[in-house]
Image (cartoon, grey):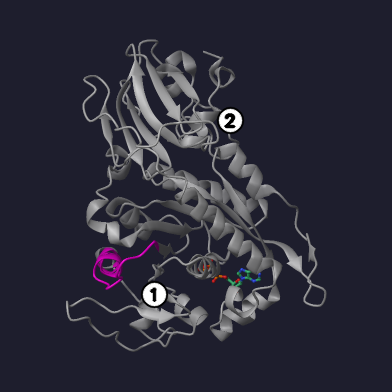
Amino acid sequence: MNSAQATPRVSDTSSMAHLGQIIAVASGKGGVGKSTLSTNLALALAAQGAAVGLVDADLYGPSVPGMLGIKTGQSPSMSPSGKVMPAQAHGIKVISMGMLTDDDKPAILRGPMVSKYLRMFILEVDWGTLDYLILDLPPGTGDTQLTLAQSFPLTGAVIVSTPQDVSLKIARRGIRMMEQVKVPILGIVENMSGFTCPTCGDVTHIFHQGGGAKIAASLGVPFLGAVPLDPAIVDCGDDGRPLVIAYPGTPAAAAYRDIAATLSGRAQTAPGMPTPFDWHWADDASKPKPSPVAGKSGGAAEVPVAMDRSGGRTLVVHWQDGHIQPIDVRDLRLACRCAACVDEMSGRAVLDPATVPLNIVPTRIWSLGNYAIGVSFSDGHSSGIYTFGHLRRMVAAEVEDV
Ligand SMILES: Nc1ncnc2c1ncn2[C@@H]1O[C@H](COP(=O)(O)OP(=O)(O)OP(=O)(O)O)[C@@H](O)[C@H]1O
């Protein structure tokens, strides 16, 4: 187990509050359309009126400047306070390694330098006050992902996949990696999921459909939408005018806007409970404060407004729609979906309920973004992430095989 797994992170959100929601766009493998999604998502959020920054965190193969028509190889100017001025393109602020080097000369950087540049891109850029900072991660599960997850209070990650089984399996691995480093999964996007006819605009499904939605359901994370394959996206990438700007009427542009609307809707379902919190179960220290807004019918089903304990063995979750849900703490342990408890590929349970002590209790419960909680238990297990959706859907049947 590495240090990221051993030491759950409790975010210090206060010093980075001006960055707004920090959303990482990730994929298990390259070429699935991550940079295209990051760029169009950032523009779609900006079109809703949000202040948006975009970090091209792919230091080795920066593609965002090309997609946005930003000049490369020119040193950015500095603000009077000594911060790097981001480029401005189509109403969003952007920083990329491509702005510092010619884009045909990929950066050769050792691990510590990767970390240094990423910190600079996030902390030493004059972002002003943002609603969203979108991070376009390089493909895979390496240094960049770990640095970002461990150093910054990410609101969560959007995972991009394509419909082929192999991609979806790799996406599942990416999700597991994010969960291991305690980054909540905001959802999965299936890209290139059907073909948009350039003549009539109809979408034909040339690969099988629905794999992204199925994986999302099996992992208990939201499915954010499917973006069809559209040849115009490639031309837009080459022309520096992303699809939502150049061809806003296409099905793919509508898909990007829907994804942005879903993500921002989720961000706005607050106020839930104030975060961050780090609740010590035994003495009730640092118990999460309840939301200023009490639960009532018509509220959101998957937003908790308070958490409590009852009798030492029951976690009581009060939801925004007024539902009060008692959860036995051993059931909570048995419902863990981390890679050690559920097989990564098949989704089958690996945890043997007989190995979980009857008197198990949580030791700590902490907030992860505004989307999930992490729990460490008295048996030493602490790698599970419980999204609010997962908690809400926990029913006796899920844990009846005790
Ligand atoms: N829905 C789509 N329809 C057609 N082409 C697409 C679509 N999405 C992305 N592309 C094209 O696929 C190629 C790869 O996209 P992109 O660079 O966004 O992928 P990536 O996952 O960020 O790749 P990398 O791993 O290199 O960072 C680009 O040429 C892009 O224009």
In-image side of 397 versus 249 (left or right): left
User: Please, is residue 302 above or below residue 15 in the view?
Assistant: above
**Element on which disc 2 rests:** loop
Q: Which type of secondary structure does the marked residue at label 1 adopt?
A: strand
Q: Is residue 149 magenta?
A: no
Residue 177 in view: yes
For label 2, count other residues whose C-alpha is less than 10 Å away and answer few (under 14), some (14-19) or many (20+).
few
Q: Which numbered mark, 2 or 1, is in the foreground of this view?
A: 1
Q: Amino acid at mark 2?
A: Arg
**Where is residue 226 shown, x and y percent of the image?**
65, 57
Residue type at numbered disc 1: Lys
Residue under pointer 1? 93
- Mark 2, residue position: 348
Question: Eyeballing the image, is 123 above or below 104?
Answer: above
Q: Is mark 1 within 8 Å of ligand 1?
A: no
Residue 382 shows in the view: no
Quadrant position of ligand 1: bottom right
Figure quadrant of residue 281: top left
